[in-house]
Amino acid sequence: MPEIVFKGKEYVYNHHLTVPYRPLLVDVAKGIGPADLGSNLIIHGDNLHALKSLLPRYAGQVDLVFIDPPYNTGNEGWCYSDGVNSPIMKEWLSTNPVDGEDMLRHDKWLCMMWPRLVLLRELLSERGSIWITLDDNEVHHARDILDEIFGADNFVATCIWQKNFSPKNTAQFFSEDHDYVLIYAKDKQLWRPNLLERTQEMDDRFTNTDNDPRGPWTSGDLSARNYYSEGTYSITCPSGRVIEGPPPGTYWRVKESKFKEMDADGRIWWGEDGANQPRLKRYLTDVKQGRTPQTLWFYNEVGHTQDAKKTLLEMGVLKDQESTITPKPVALIERILELASEPDSLILDSFAGSGTTAHAVLKANAKDGGRRRFILVEGEDYADK
Ligand SMILES: C[S@@+](CC[C@H](N)C(=O)[O-])C[C@H]1O[C@@H](n2cnc3c(N)ncnc32)[C@H](O)[C@@H]1O
C-alpha cells in the first residue's frame, strides 16, 4: 500500500507512546451532577494529553468518535503545540500560528493529527467508528494517514455535506458549497450504519386504491433488461387485451406459473380499466423499515453553517454572526448519531469547540429515552463556558 511521506513523520510515528499519563482532575465547582469521571465529561486541555489520560479507563470503550479539527485553511490561527523531541518541531513552536504562507503547514497539520488519530483508534471499541469533518485543504492528506492508521480496508465512505445555502459571488474560482465527512470503522467487518428514519414522503408513495387487505402498496415494473429464459410469454389482461410479450429487449421478471399465482392472489395491478401492462405490487409492510444512508447530505436535512451560528446566537453563547468560531449545526451531529450510535453509546469529540456534540447527544437521548454519554475535549476557554 502506498504510504504518505511528510516532514516530521518519523518523530510523530510513535509519539503517542511518550506522552505522559496526566491525571484527570474533576472541577466540582464547574460540574453539574456527580463528580464522577464515569459520567458526561468536558475536559479542558490539550487533546493529545487528554486522550492519553482517557486510555486507562476508556481504551476500547468508545462507540463513536466525531471530530471537527482545524481545517488548516491558512487563516484560522491554529497552532502546532506538541513539543516533540526534534529540532525541526521545536522550531515549529516558534512560528505559530500556522498561516497560509507557511510552506510546511500541511506537514505540521499531519504531525498534529497523527498521534491524536492513533489514540482515538485505541479508544474506539471493536464495533466503533470515527467521523471527521474536513474540506479540500486536508481531506486528501487525511485519507492517506487514516488509511495507514485505521487500515484502508476500514474506510467506509466520504459524505458530502452541503454547508452553504447560497453562492458567494465574491469567490475567485468556485463558490464552495460543501465540506466532507470522512468515515472509518475500527473494523469494517463488524460495523454497519443504522438505517435512517423513513420520511412521510416515502410512505406517502404507497396507497391502497383497491382496498388490498395487505395494506398500502406501490407498483413496480414486471419487465426488466436482465435475460430470463422463462420471461417471454404472452399475457391476457382482465379486459381481454392480449400482450404478446415483454417490451423489446426486456423479459418478464417472473415465470408464467408464478405470475398466474400472484394474479390470483391480487398481487398484480392492471390499471383502473384492467387493460394496462401488468405491474407487480410492492407492499409498505415488505419494504425496509428505514432509509439506507446516502453520501450526499443536503442542508435542508442536516443544517448549514449559518444555522449553526444562529443556534449559538439564540442561546446567547455567541454575540454576533461574524464571530470567527465555526460551529457545526446540531442537526449534522444528530444525523451522525442516528447512523452510528445506540441508546447506550459513549461518544467522544476531542475538538469540541462550542460543544455541539454534547448538544446533539442530549437531544438524541431526549428523543429516544437513551442514556448516551459524551466526552468532550477542548483546549480553549469555550470548555469553561
Ligand atoms: C473547528 S473547531 C470545532 C467546532 C465544533 N465542532 C463546534 O461545533 O463548535 C476546532 C476546535 O478544536 C480546538 N482545538 C484545536 N486544537 C486543539 C488541541 N490540540 N486540543 C484541544 N482542542 C483543540 C479549537 O480550540 C477549536 O475550538
Image (spheres, rainbow, N blue to C red):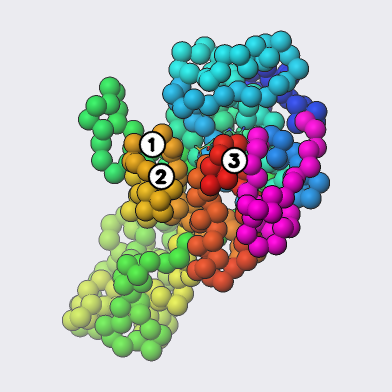
What predominant SS class does the magenta segment belong to? loop
* Closer to the camera in the image, 210 or 80: 80
Q: Is residue 203 above or below residue 306?
A: below
Q: Which residues are magenta?
A: 19-47
The numbered mark, 3 or 1, whose residue comes first in the sequence reads 1
The numbered dot on residue 168 is: none
Residue at left 68%, top 24%?
82
Q: Are marks 2 and 1 in contact (CB under 8 Å)?
A: yes
Q: Tell me the amino acid under the disc marked 3.
A: Glu
Residue 52 falls in image quadrant:
top right
- CA distance separating discs 2 and 3: 17 Å
Q: Is residue 368 visible?
A: yes
Quadrant location of the N terminus in the rendered image: top right
Q: Residue at x 65, y 53 (%)?
A: 29
**Regarding ligand 1, which quadrant of the image does it lie in?**
top right
Secondary structure at badge 3 equals strand
Q: Which residue is mark 1?
A: 323
Q: What residue do we see at 70% from left, 62% from top?
A: 34
Circle 1 residues within 10 Å: few <14, some 14–19, many ≥20: few
Is the CB–ligand 1 distance for label 3 below 8 Å? yes
Label 3 vs label 1: CA separation? 18 Å
Q: Amino acid at mark 2?
A: Leu
For residue 345, above or below residue 65: below
The residue identified by callout 2 is 318
Instruction: Please tell me which residue lies in front, 291 or 125.
Output: 125
Q: Secondary structure at mark 2?
A: loop
Q: Nearer the viewer, mark 2 or mark 3?
A: 2
| Residue closer to the observer: 284 or 88 | 88
Instruction: Check disc 3 and report the residue beneath it.
Output: 378
